[in-house]
Amino acid sequence: MESRRARPTLRVLQDDLRDGWKSHHPQPGPGVGGLDPLSPLSELPHPIIQKARECFGDDPQQDNFVGPVKSCTRFTLLEIKSGQWRGGIWIDSGTGTCWLVSAGLAKGGHEDRDDFYERVKRADKSGEIDKWLPTDDDRRQLKRETAAKLLTDWELDIQRLVLEALRTVADGGTAAFMLPHPKDPAKRFGTCEVTLERVREPGFEREETVVEIELENEFRTSHLGWQATMHVLISISPPETGWDRFGDTHSTIDEMGSHALRIDQLQKITDDGLVAQSSSNDKAHYTHRRNLAQSSVMGRSVRSMCGVYFVPYRDHESLPKCSVCEERYHGLPR
């Protein structure tokens, strides 16, 4: 379902607010007109956009506006104010979405040609105001934002479940949970089991994490299934190249104490509403030469001398050497 929260049309951004919004939204993205669907237009930090969002939220009973703009006779245009800024909100009766379709400054005692009210009056008289209403591009951008939010909320739900599992196995053991369905909570998506074991051997102490993910048949080879799997792994240990895979089982080895540190990190980003991101392997590790060729071609991870699993596909000469690997390499008998 589309959000009701007030949002500007593309025309308002490109014409009425001109370049004012671009300083807050400089990077082009995959959405309509180069806009990033992960950054909703309703959240752009322009004063009149912020005012629109505050005055027209999810609850229609809480709408707060000055009144109808009298010079607009072709449809109901509701006025909002923020300092000298003025805005006109049109509510789509079909979807309930509130659109900021006009914005401008009140100036010159309302006699200036560029005054907000004068512009509305001229556009209403000429019929141009009909073109201010949302276009197909506006609706496509909104759908992209809605889909992006749905995906973000789903990934955050997965993060919370992973975080709970990590706390359960903090001292070692196994925790299992159901993976949520991205759209329908009543449908099964899959299960996840997380096992933590602390390995202590002479000269070698590491934390080994094993994750078993079993997806429902319809998701086993789907993009959503792979995305859920990767997000579970990234939430536990961000370098995705550090995970080794065998069927539905994934494993990784980290330094002692990494698990507790990751719990704190994951708690913070989840509390902030942020989605965990993957991080690349940033060190050159030592491993047996015979492992490299096939692993590079097949994309399989290998275990380094320090215990880290990685896929050797990057140019190792450009990376700093892993100090643990280097120490153990030079400690080998000659």
Image: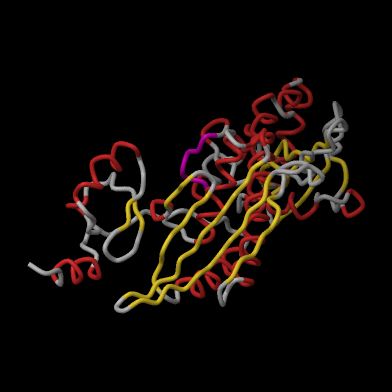
81 shown above or below 101: below
Magenta segment: 25-30
Q: Is residue 29 magenta?
A: yes
Outermost residue, right side:
61
State the count of labels: 0
Q: Measured from the top left, where is residue 321 in percent x and y?
A: 21, 62
Q: Is residue 231 magenta?
A: no
For the C terminus, give its image quadrant. bottom left
The answer to whether residue 68 is left or right of residue 252 is right
On-image quarter of the N terminus: top right
Depth order, front residue of 12/304: 304
What is the residue that sits farthest to the left in this orientation? 334
Q: Nearer the viewer, residue 308 or 21?
A: 308
- Residue drawn 24% across the image and 46% down it: 292
Q: How is the image coloured?
A: secondary structure
Judge left or right: residue 209 versus residue 17.
Answer: left
Residue 121 figure quarter = top right
- Tell me the residue at 59%/49% (across/down): 213
Residue 276 vertical position relative to residue 124 in the rendered view, above or below? below
Q: Position of residue 307 (x, y in %)?
A: 33, 64
Predominant secondary structure, magenta span? loop
Answer with left or right where residue 185 lies relative to residue 278: right
Q: Residue at x 67, y 31 (%)?
A: 138
Residue nearest the viewer, comparing 231 with 129: 231
Between residues 8 and 48, which one lies in front from this camera angle? Answer: 8
Question: Is residue 144 depicted above or below 315 in this figure?
Answer: above
Q: Quadrant of residue 78?
A: top right
Q: Position of residue 129 (x, y in %)?
A: 74, 26
Q: Position of residue 83 (x, y in %)?
A: 69, 57
